[in-house]
Image: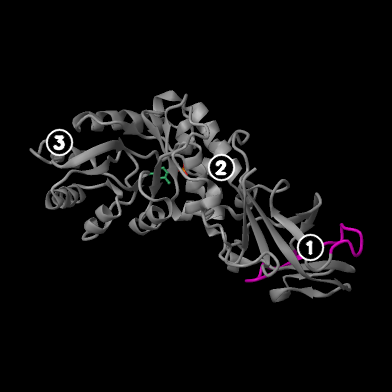
Amino acid sequence: MDDDTGRGFPANDVDSSSPVSEAAAGAVLTIDLGAVRENYRRLKARLNGLRCAGVLKADGYGLGAAQVAAALAKQGCDIFFVALLGEGIALRKAVGPGLDIFVLNGLPPGSEPEAAAAGLCPVINSASQLKAWRETARGMGRSLPAAIQVDSGMARLGMAPAEVEAVAGEAGAFDGIDIRFVMSHLARADEPQQAANEKQRREFDRLRGMLPAAPASLANSSGIFLGPAYHYDLARPGAALYGVNPTPHEPNPMLPVIGLQAKVAQTRRVGPGAGIGYGHAHHADGPLDLATISLGYGDGWHRRAASAAWFEGVRLPFIGRVSMDSIILDISALPAGRLSEGDLVELIGPSQSVDDAAGHAGTIGYEILTSLGARFHRRYVDS
Ligand SMILES: *Cc1c(COP(=O)(O)O)cnc(C)c1O
């Protein structure tokens, strides 16, 4: 099947250099590219070997689009999706020619020549984008690849039904356009009981029936788990590749991909009544052992994400407010002196998943991942 026969390049060829050394950094983000590849393999198995793209928007959900692309290519993945043209241009430079890169948000007017020069495929979301791409193709004297997106019921991106009907009835509307896929996106794929899914699927079939015949694509990560009726010719998972649970009401079928550890900057003991952190949001009831770690909301750690760090399986509650560059932990549960400057405590890892942290913050794992900061030392491993 798609095992290491990939067309790509080995992951080690990609520049994985981190902006900051491990010794200098306040926190270490570990990204397991082997887990990304295993997650891709698991999704492919669910898809019975159908084609499966990798969604790499927002710099691979914050984990490094170039590194993730290299890992997926090694696994046989040859189609990638980004959101913005700029992301596509950067990814093209990183992966070279030969792999398909689609731009989900379409092309801003006037940027078509730049997209064509970089060998990128727009996802065409409107009649005006279709016209602009057609004219670009005509000007270049060759056909240009694209995906056509229809809005099957999300009202975000894609041609509305009336627009689909209009272009379908227009002679030459698709001249010079090599339609690689007709696609749409599900609004409620993570809610399998929702009738909206079936409704969107039927509407997708109706709309693509009006368009020139082409392979179809509907499922994101969660959509893959809605069953074969949603698989069509190509799936487009993002979050599941990165270890976010695509089936939020059931155990996570994916492997975790990231670990986040922060360094202890200082430890101290305070006496009863001590005011702790900004606003003295907490006062010590009795003597307390504290550790301050070098990670805060300036690293994309939401002020309400999670409420504890972990050390060797021991829970160390946050105490007081999360600062820009630091968080104070109550380490009284550890033997005195067990934790010292430079030690690493776990924020995300075996004791606390991305989805756990998201749950605390009242957000989704996607936002936790894409917020991960630029100050971390990034350690890429391939398990
Ligand atoms: C983000 C996105 C995906 C991937 O979604 P996940 O839920 O991360 O799997 C697929 N298709 C479109 C159009 C998207 O915007």
Task: Name the quadrant where ligand 1 sits.
Answer: top left
Q: Which residue is mark 3?
A: 168
The quadrant of the image that shows the C terminus is top right
Q: Tell me if 183 is positioned left or right of 377 in this view.
A: left
**Secondary structure that dominates the magenta span:** loop
Name the quadrant containing residue 38: top right
> Which numbered disc, 3 or 1, marks the residue that appears first in the sequence?
3
> Which numbered disc, 3 or 2, marks the residue that appears first in the sequence?
2
- Mark nearer the viewer, 3 or 1: 1
| Element at label 3 | helix
Check disc 1 and give the amino acid type.
Asp
Q: Residues within 10 Å of mark 1 (few under 14, many from 20)?
A: some
Instruction: Name the residue located 75 percent from the left edge and 65 percent from the top edge.
Output: 319
Magenta stretch, residue numbers: 319-339
Q: CA distance from mark 3 to mark 1?
A: 63 Å
Instruction: Name the residue located 43 percent from the left edge and 24 percent from the top edge.
Output: 228
Name the quadrant containing residue 270: bottom right
116 magenta-colored: no
Name the quadrant containing residue 204: top left
- Which label belongs to residue 14? none
Q: Position of residue 265 (x, y in %)?
A: 75, 71
Q: Tell me if 346 is positioned left or right of 202 in this view.
A: right
Q: Which residue is mark 1?
A: 343
Q: CA distance from mark 1 to mark 2?
A: 28 Å
Label pair 3/2, CB-CB below 8 angstroms = no
> Which numbered disc, 1 or 2, marks the residue that appears first in the sequence?
2
Q: Position of residue 366 (x, y in %)?
A: 52, 50
Q: Which residue is mark 2?
A: 36
Report the front residue among 208 and 8.
8
Queried on whether the Cβ of the residue with tag 3 lies below 8 angstroms from ligand 1, the answer reads no
Q: Tell me if 333 is positioned left or right of 231 in this view.
A: right
Q: Position of residue 354 (x, y in %)?
A: 62, 49
